Amino acid sequence: MAQAARALWPGGRALAWRLSGNPAPRVPLQSRAGFTGAAGGPGPTAITRKVSRRLLGTAALALGGAMGLYYTAQWHLRAQDLRAERPAAELSLSDRLQLTLYQYKTCPFCSKVRAFLDFHALPYQVVEVNPVRRGEIKFSSYRKVPILLAQEGESLQQLNDSSVIISALKTYLVSGQPLEVIITYYPPMKAMNDQGKEVTEFCNKYWLMLDEKEAQRMYGGKEARTEEMKWRQWADDWLVHLISPNVYRTPAEALASFDYIVREGKFGAVEGAVAKYLGAAAMYLISKRLKSRHHLQDDVREDLYDAANKWVAAVGKHRPFMGGQKPNLADLAVYGVLRVMEGLESFDDLMRHTHIQPWYLRVEKAIAEAPQ
């Protein structure tokens, strides 16, 4: 049942699996940081192995950076040929894509993708994945959500990782390059973390593969592009990790959160009943570990409030969105992460005790008014 507890917010995955007695799944590198060795400290052999793993990991990251530069250079050459081959009339391509999103509705990463698709008026079908059996994604060796299947003519592509999905689709909409070419610019990279576990990251995932004219038209300058990338990464690396500790902060909040999960997710009758009570209890305990892992304050609401006000300060008083007159990818990412708390006590507290509500409502309105 602890497996079902992963459906809403991903910060508690590792401990939830330990509670279930099953082997722990792989998690992103940053979410596993901070674990230490056994009591008494490691011996010389263990230290040597740990240093070796770190050296291998560092070498893998360096290799990944070199690969990113290689793929970027390769893209510049290939993109020139593609643009010469394709008429300008074909650059409006959103209606040529058939998209299917495999998701947990209450997952913040999935919510980010939906916010992007809705704002850009991209039609898509949703397949709600059962968080226990996950039979809906048995076709995929990649076992996380979101997964996006994109049909473009005879070409069917699978896109993994929320930020890769968003970057690839935005590149597609702006440049008109074939999606099967674009996804090669975001290669997966495997490395070893400090625990000796293999993890997968994606090169260039916050970067849009645009030429200078396209980038100038979209951003107006390098500063805006850098700012968008910075805050997209902040949403993934920090903001998302504040959700679980806040929605599971107390036993009552944990129960309310799982009532929401069961209501919105794809559960059988028995699974839903078990998830609501055992899942809530498990995630309440997990939230305490998450608070320690991410060095949060005793009152985790304060970290959530600080993050919201930091975001509002970054947007500033003289523009409605970080993207200026319309939301950019950072606006949509932050909105998507926060949206999964709607209807819960943590969301109501966030709106009351920070300055984020006007911006949040503006993004909500912009998405609602997107042409269908």
Image (spheres, rainbow, N blue to C red):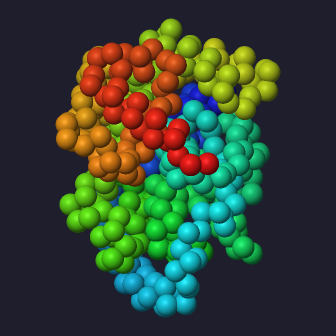
Rendering quarter of residue 216: bottom left
Give the residue displayed 34% in from the left and 33% down from the top: 359
- Residue at the extreme right: 269
Residue at the image point whose x is 55% and y is 84% from the top: 87
- The answer to whether residue 285 is above or below residue 235 is above
Q: Looking at this view, is 100 or 215 the one in front?
A: 215
Residue for point 79% across, 26% down: 268
Please identify the quadrant where the N terminus is shown: top right
Expressed as whole percent of the image width and height from the top left, the position of residue 271 reads 75, 24
Residue 270 in sight from this viewpoint: yes
User: Residue 173 appears at what percent x and percent y?
Assistant: 51, 66
Q: Position of residue 209 (x, y in %)?
A: 41, 72
Image quadrant assignment for residue 110: top right
List the single residue furthest toward the top. Answer: 252
- Tell me how many marks there are: 0
The picture places residue 159, in percent across and down from the top left corner, at 59, 61
Q: Is residue 45 left or right of residue 256?
A: left
Residue 26 appears in the figure: no
Q: Who is closer to the viewer here, 66 or 124?
A: 124
Q: Looking at the image, is 365 positioned above or below residue 26? A: above
Residue at 62% over, 38% down: 104
